């Protein structure tokens, strides 16, 4: 399977998505890779289409003489807005020795096992790292590469028995809109897996409940020389707003099942300040309480400084897929058995984020998430293991085999 050759080719495409954009996909450059993937599928003699929203859908017909579930494999092509994805310069470190890796000597960017302990599990692996100037793009071009490698294997080995396989590549997952326009009826699948996780062997079926909050604060601008008792500085009011939220509920102070409120952007001046937050929690009740904290903070600000000083908009983005998947545990069990059959112990961990699979699950397509072998997403310390990527593709093939036995 030519997983890594594909991966190194795909990361050369700059596919960074963009927040707060009305166009879909949010950046036209994502379409370059999506079109390329469609053509690659066609070259493999797989029926594939690119629709008006940028979704690539490919279908491999069943080659068994009985009715079996239709399985979908899903990955997204966009990279995070948090770090540049342009001119990615990836390099392979053979037989990693467990020591510090200098990514960029000029800027003193060093990948350290003491900071990123997952590296200790990859000693002896061949790993791919960045040059410290960009992210790597393993999230989720590694998942794309693994799916493409599986598709190629199925086409080159017709004796390998399988039901119908649906392939879906999406844009804009990183900005929360990966499935905004998807019609699951076009997929016509019984269940699916996203390949969009971390360590190989992970099977995740719990994710955050998620909402986005936009806060607009209106101030009053007066010449600073005569501002006493007249000026209302919106930036300072924005700081005050933040003080009404629980200080311990930030990403850097939470882990596991602990929720957080994360300030994404803050821009403003005396007259007007705009804040955008993401609100996350696995527990639905606590999630609703976090949203109430934002509502209460808004009411306090308006009571103190006047009505409409603070305007709050909260939009739910996705919900914990476990609320649905708990009634479809056989899908999780299939993945667990496949992971065991390639010699690994299944790793069950909640996702501290979300995937296309969360929304698809609520749209009626049960869709847990599988590890791909990528780590430290969204920044220059991102890396992936070649051996883990190959093992991830093996797991998918085992799942396909088990699907024919259901």
Image (cartoon, helix red, strand yellow):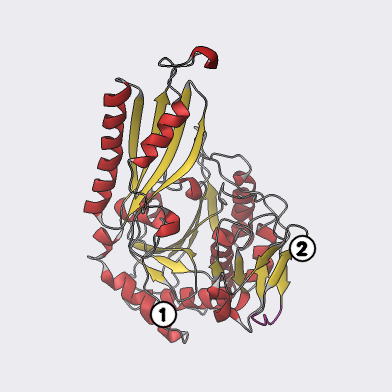
Outermost residue to the right: 106
Query: Which residue does the image show at 41% across and 46% down from the upper left?
Result: 182
Of residues 111 and 176, which is closer to you in this image?
111
Alpha carbon distance from label 2 to label 1: 42 Å
Q: Quadrant of residue 70?
A: bottom left
Q: Bounds of the magenta span?
A: 94-98
SS label for mark 2:
loop
Please tell me how crowded label 2 is: few (under 14), some (14-19), or many (20+) other residues with Cα within 10 Å.
few
Q: Quadrant of residue 154?
A: bottom right
- Is residue 33 something that shows in the picture? yes
- Is residue 404 something that shows in the picture? no
Quarter of the rendering occupied by the N terminus: bottom right
User: Which residue, given by chain and number where applicable, does mark 1 sit on?
Assistant: 338
Of residues 381 and 226, which is closer to you in this image?
226
The image shows residue 183, relative to residue 396, as above or below, that is above
SS label for mark 1:
helix
Query: Magenta region's main secondary structure?
Result: loop
Of residues 3 and 382, which is closer to you in this image?
382
x and y percent of residue 160 in the render?
A: 50, 79
Please tell me how crowded label 1 is: few (under 14), some (14-19), or many (20+) other residues with Cα within 10 Å.
many
User: Which residue, given by chain and number where applicable, does mark 2 sit on?
Assistant: 105
């Amino acid at each position: 399977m030519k997983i890594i050759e594909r991966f190194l080719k795909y990361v050369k495409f700059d596919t960074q998505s963009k927040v707060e954009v009305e166009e879909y996909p949010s950046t036209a450059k994502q379409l370059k890779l999506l079109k390329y993937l469609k053509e690659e599928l066609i070259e493999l003699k797989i029926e594939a289409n690119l629709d008006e929203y940028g979704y690539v859908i490919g279908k491999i017909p069943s080659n068994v003489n009985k009715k079996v579930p239709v399985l979908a494999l899903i990955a997204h092509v966009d990279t995070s807005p948090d770090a540049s994805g342009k001119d990615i310069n990836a390099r392979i470190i053979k037989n990693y020795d467990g020591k510090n890796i200098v990514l960029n000597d000029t800027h003193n960017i060093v990948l350290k096992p003491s900071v990123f302990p997952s590296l200790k599990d990859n000693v002896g692996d061949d790993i791919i790292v960045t040059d410290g100037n960009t992210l790597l793009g393993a999230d989720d071009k590694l998942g794309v590469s693994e799916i493409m490698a599986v598709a190629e294997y199925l086409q080159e080995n017709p004796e390998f028995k399988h039901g119908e396989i649906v392939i879906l590549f999406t844009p804009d997952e990183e900005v929360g809109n990966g499935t905004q326009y998807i019609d699951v009826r076009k997929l016509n699948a019984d269940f699916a897996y996203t390949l969009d996780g971390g360590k190989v062997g992970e099977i995740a079926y719990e994710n955050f409940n998620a909402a986005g909050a936009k806060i607009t604060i209106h101030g009053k601008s007066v010449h600073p020389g005569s501002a006493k008792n007249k000026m209302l500085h919106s930036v300072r009011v924005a700081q005050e707003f933040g003080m009404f939220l629980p200080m311990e509920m930030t990403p850097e102070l939470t882990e596991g099942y602990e929720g957080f409120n994360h300030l994404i952007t803050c821009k403003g001046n005396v007259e007007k300040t705009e804040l955008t937050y993401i609100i996350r929690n696995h527990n639905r009740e606590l999630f609703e309480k976090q949203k109430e904290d934002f509502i209460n903070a808004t009411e306090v600000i308006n009571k103190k400084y006047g009505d409409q000083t603070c305007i709050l908009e909260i939009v739910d983005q996705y919900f914990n897929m476990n609320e649905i998947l708990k009634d479809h545990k056989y899908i999780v069990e299939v993945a667990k058995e496949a992971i065991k059959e390639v010699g690994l112990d299944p790793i069950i961990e909640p996702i501290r984020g979300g995937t296309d699979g969360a929304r698809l699950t609520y749209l009626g397509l049960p869709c847990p998430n599988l590890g791909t072998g990528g780590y430290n997403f969204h920044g220059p310390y991102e890396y992936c293991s070649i051996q883990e990527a190959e093992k991830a593709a093996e797991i998918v093939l085992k799942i396909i085999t088990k699907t024919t036995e259901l």
